[in-house]
Image (cartoon, rainbow, N blue to C red):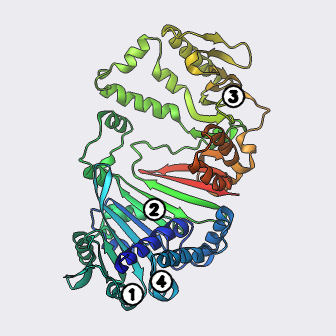
Amino acid sequence: MPALVKLRLVLISVLAALAALVAGCGGSDDSSGGSSEAATLAPPTAPVFIDFAIRPEGATKTNIEELAKKLAGVDDLGGLIVEELENSASEDGEEFDFEKEVEPWLGERAGLFLQEYEEEDFEGYGAAIQVEDEDEAREFVDKQIESSDEAVEDGSYEDVDFKVQEDETAIGVFDGFVVFAENEAIFKSMVDASKGDNLAGEKSFTDAIGNVSDESAADVFVDIGGLIEEAGNEIDSDTQAFLDSAGIEPREATAVASLVPGSDNVEIDFSSNLSGDNPPSGDASELLGSLPGTAVGAFAADEFGQRFNEGIDKIDEQGIPGEVPPNQLKKSLKQAGVDLEAIAGSIGDVGVYVTGNSEKTLAGALVMEAEDETQATNTVSNIGLFLRKAGVPGVTKLSEGATGFSIRSPELGRQPAVVAAKGDRIVIGYGLASALSAFEESGKTLSDNAAFQEAESALGGTPITAFVEGASALNLASAMVPAGEAEFEEAEQYLKKVDYLAIGSEASGDLATAKLILGVK
């Protein structure tokens, strides 16, 4: 394999390996999270930009090593990565000494941008690896070029020298970075960016990155509006109706995802201004924690009735293209005996949970908190009235445990659908026992689960909105995934180490934020 091609593969391997195994778990103590120096080499219109640490130190390095031991039984992650790179080079008939050839010049961070988005795929990339010594980095690049049999063209642009390979990949060293791009045009655009307008100077980028935690080790910036523009500015009518109903304008939106380290968890932070006119800002964690302790996973949302009503109002005003004319949806349903405004007005927080350890026992329910017991009973009665008028067969009144009814049919499978009310709760579920467990006051709840308690602690002040218990979820997945699925069997050894997955979310102004934490045993 030509040496310069090997150089390109080595650099990309360093990026990929360190990004996945190192930056995903920690960052250097000497550089704050969200550092975006590499963004000065990205064009201002780049819709996707990834920035990450490649040389973590101190506590972050310790966290990485702890996670590597717990997840994969690896004692020296950095050494393993270097060994794999050197072995890969040796197998291709080339000698490669990372410590002598790369270590002296390799910097702290790196960046990668994706350029054009066409036909559900990206075309064009540029990457920059920070260097501590440009001369040594340039010497390394030149050495690889000199030992290559591949035809390489010299180029120069705006006083920056570079090389172009046969596959059109361009590489050069300038502004404290080893820079490589998919082609010469993109490389030149990176030179232009370094000397003029660039992504780091865009307000949309700086505002988004400004929300990144100082402990972040890797950040992915996405210009949602830019992607839509790259895709031809087209949004299908149904999606547009939904976005309009929520007061969301995606063409002006951005988002950032960040990776934050931990010795016993991996955290991903999200933030976006794609939150609509009235983003959820309440706290439904109390409802989530009160759901059955047998739940494999659960989710809760605050003030659901209010947001549901607001969404219905906007959909009713605009209608559903090709199906319901404007200002007819609520009217038509009311004539059928379903008053959406009354039902939505009686509902507060909402939760969903799943139980079971096999396809046969799989069940779950939607739990709605009503303003009072009378409203709960009336809501169930309205739902029953609607079903009877719709001629739904198999409806049976519940005899005990709660007020409501069940519905059985071959289409629903082994278990019945259940609609019930008790106290200030309304439950719509699959499986009678699972649904009625939402009313049990003496049974264990999620808040009694040690993993749930640990998840709440890891989220800090961010209200927990979703939880999955690792062992229970793996048992269910193992029962449902067909035997012999090689990919699942390979992943199972790592999934066994997952204690929980938790999501927390909140909103302030037009900014919505969320945390996803994967706890490791």
Q: Which is nearer the eye, 52 or 378? A: 52
Instruction: State the separation of the CA atoms marked 4 and 3.
Output: 60 Å
Q: Quadrant of the N terminus?
A: bottom left
Identify residue type, mark 3: Ser
Q: Secondary structure at mark 2?
A: loop
Reading the image, the residue beneath label 1 is 140
In the picture, the disc for residue 96 is: 4
Q: Nearer the viewer, mark 2 or mark 1?
A: 1
Q: Residue 153 location in percent, x, y?
A: 22, 80
Identify residue type, mark 4: Phe
Q: Mark 1: give few (<14), some (14-19) or many (20+) Cα within 10 Å.
A: some
Q: Residue at x 27, y 49 (%)?
A: 231
Reading the image, the residue beneath label 2 is 211
Instruction: State the separation of the CA atoms marked 3 and 2.
Output: 41 Å
Instruction: State the separation of the CA atoms marked 4 and 1.
Output: 11 Å
In the drawing, does residue 92 fall left or right of residue 204? right
Q: Are marks 4 and 2 in contact (CB under 8 Å)?
A: no
Between discs 4 and 3, the one toward the N terminus: 4
Q: Nearer the viewer, mark 4 or mark 3?
A: 4
Identify residue type, mark 2: Asn
Q: Residue 280 location in percent, x, y?
A: 49, 43
Q: Residue 361 location in percent, x, y?
A: 68, 30
Q: Nearer the viewer, mark 3 or mark 2?
A: 3
Q: Nearer the viewer, mark 4 or mark 2?
A: 4
Q: Nearer the viewer, mark 4 or mark 1?
A: 4
Q: Residue 299 location in percent, x, y?
A: 59, 40
Reading the image, the residue beneath label 3 is 434
The relative height of residue 169 versus residue 95 in the rendered view (above or below) is: above
Residue 461 visible, this angle? no
Q: Quadrant of the C terminus?
A: bottom right
Q: Secondary structure at mark 3?
A: helix
The relative height of residue 285 versus residue 9 in the rendered view (above or below) is: above
